[in-house]
Amino acid sequence: MKDKFIYKNEEIEFEIIYSKRKTLEISIEPPDKIRVRAPNRLPKYKIINRLIEKGDWILKHLNYFKTIDYKEINKEFIDGESLLYLGKEYTLKIYEENLKKKSEVYIEEDNIVVRIKDKNKDKIKKVLQLWYRQQALSYIIQSAEKYEKIFSKKPKDIVVKEQKRRWGSCTYDNRLLFNWRCIMAEPRAIDYVILHEMCHMVYKDHSKNFWNLVSSIMPDYKEQKQWFKINGHKLEL
């Protein structure tokens, strides 16, 4: 749901996402996407008042994002194309072979290698996405196990799925859901997302207590959060 407000003679567009939550959250993604996650039935004038209160902060980020070389990612899935994995750029190498077994994907030096029967772009995309999902689940499970020692609770389940707008989420019964694209980010940034959702097993909101808990475990969490704001648009396949 798109809307606008005026701040310092500038017309600023934003999107409201209503859900069952107690707090209001404002997020900005490059180049100029402002999203407000708000509790159901919160009056729009209160949302706009909050945006005006944060006006300087919003303009600061919008102006900063203008300095970033933002380009929409449109992969062609051709030999020699660049792919991100754990924050590092790899070169895609595609080999068309008459395989008796299923297509395979693996890392070899600075390359992500795809061996496939048919160099069909849709098929290459499908096998790459499956590989990324597998790698993401494996990494997230191992990382979550490290943090489990800190918490008195354990995740009921860990799931990697398709999520367009979120990097992760925690359900009411402590199932942790993650965007498979996270695996393209730097390891420290991925760990922040994992830790963030694990802290929601303790606090279901974004209260001061929640952020204090995150900070006590990962003091540099703001840097990792900022990494996603700046680089999140690059994590596409």
Image (cartoon, helix red, strand yellow):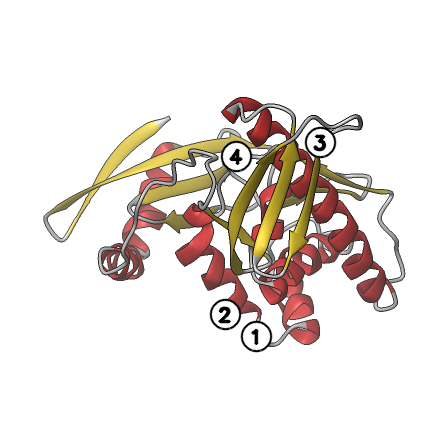
Q: Nearer the viewer, mark 3 or mark 2?
A: 3
Q: Quick check: marks 1 and 3 in contact, CB under 8 Å?
A: no
Marks 4 and 2, how far apart at CA: 22 Å
| Circle nearer the N terminus (1, 3) | 3
CB under 8 Å between discs 4 and 2: no
Disc sitting over residue 137 in the figure: none
Q: Quadrant location of residue 69? A: bottom left
Q: Nearer the viewer, mark 3 or mark 4?
A: 3
> Between marks 1 and 3, how big is the CA–CA gap?
40 Å
Q: Which residue is located at x 38 percent, y 36 percent? A: 74
Instruction: Decide which of tag 4 and tag 1 comes sooner along the chain.
Output: 4
Distance between mark 3 and mark 4 Cα atoms: 27 Å
**Residue under pointer 1:** 220
Q: Which residue is mark 3?
A: 103
The residue labelled by disc 4 is 164
Residue type at mark 2 is Glu
- Kind of residue at badge 1: Asp
CB under 8 Å between callouts 1 and 2?
A: yes
Taking 69 as reference, is 166 left or right?
right
Q: Quadrant of residue 109?
A: bottom right
